[in-house]
Image (spheres, rainbow, N blue to C red):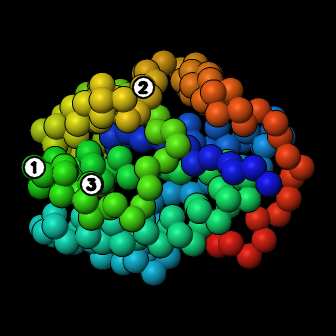
Amino acid sequence: MDRGAHISLEGIDGSGKTTQAYMLLTWLRGQGYRARYSAEPTYGRIGSVIRLHVYRTRNTPPEYEALLFAADRVEHYKKFIRPLVARGWLMVSDRYLHSSLAYQGVMLRDVEWVREINKFSPPPDLAILIDVRVEKALQRIKRRKIKFEKRELLSKVQREYRRLVECGEMERVDGEGAVEEVAADVRDVVMKFLRRKRLLTKPLLESAGSIPI
């Protein structure tokens, strides 16, 4: 069976990436692809620690956060992403490697160290940045308590994401249009990628079996 592909959607908090990830998943399935959604942090052993403790604790050392995210990602990749992609599935991840490079890389001022501790989690086949202005993102999340919503930090994270786009690691989609317009642009990027990788043939749908979400 041909290998599938791993697609990640990235962006600062309030960018709309989760909505776009679900819309892309629905569209891929509607086109006949075997597609699955995942998100980071996961709901696995380490991801649960991040969600239950790190996100609710103030002044957590950024080094500690970075290492936890890296460990969660290894488990996510080896137990979920790699097995499904090997069986021909398209994986749609709501955050993955580039989130750590942008967030923890900025907080630690050491993107290369963050990249090093994540070396056992291969980059996605396609990473898409849903790019919105910080002011727009803050308007969207003003009623939510999010650890990383400080304007200064988000501005630095946004600049790092855009640097990764300039370096060729990510594809950029303008996230400030109407939801359907953004979704159409995301689909366009994905379709160009699938054509380039010759993944337009849609295998018969099958169950993901016992692989956990």
Identify the image quadrant of residue 137: top left
Residue type marked 1:
Arg
| Residue behind mark 1 | 109
Farthest residue in the right direction?
Answer: 204
The residue located at (78%, 43%) in the rendering is 33
What is the C-alpha distance between the residues marked 3 and 1?
Answer: 12 Å
Would residue 193 appear left or right of 10 to someone viewing this image?
A: right
Res. 194 mark: none
The residue where tag 2 is placed is 172
Please name the residue shown 74% across and 76% down the image: 210
Residue 115 is labelled as: 3
Quadrant (top left/top right/bottom left/bottom right) for the C terminus: bottom right
At 38% from the left edge and 52% from the top edge, which residue is drawn?
97
167 left or right, relative to 44: left
Q: Would you call the spot at circle 2 few (<14 residues within 10 Å), some (14-19), or many (20 or more)?
A: many
Left or right of 183: which side holds 16? left
Upstream in sequence: badge 3 or badge 2: 3
- Position of residue 183 relative to residue 66, above or below, is above
Q: Nearer the viewer, mark 3 or mark 2?
A: 3
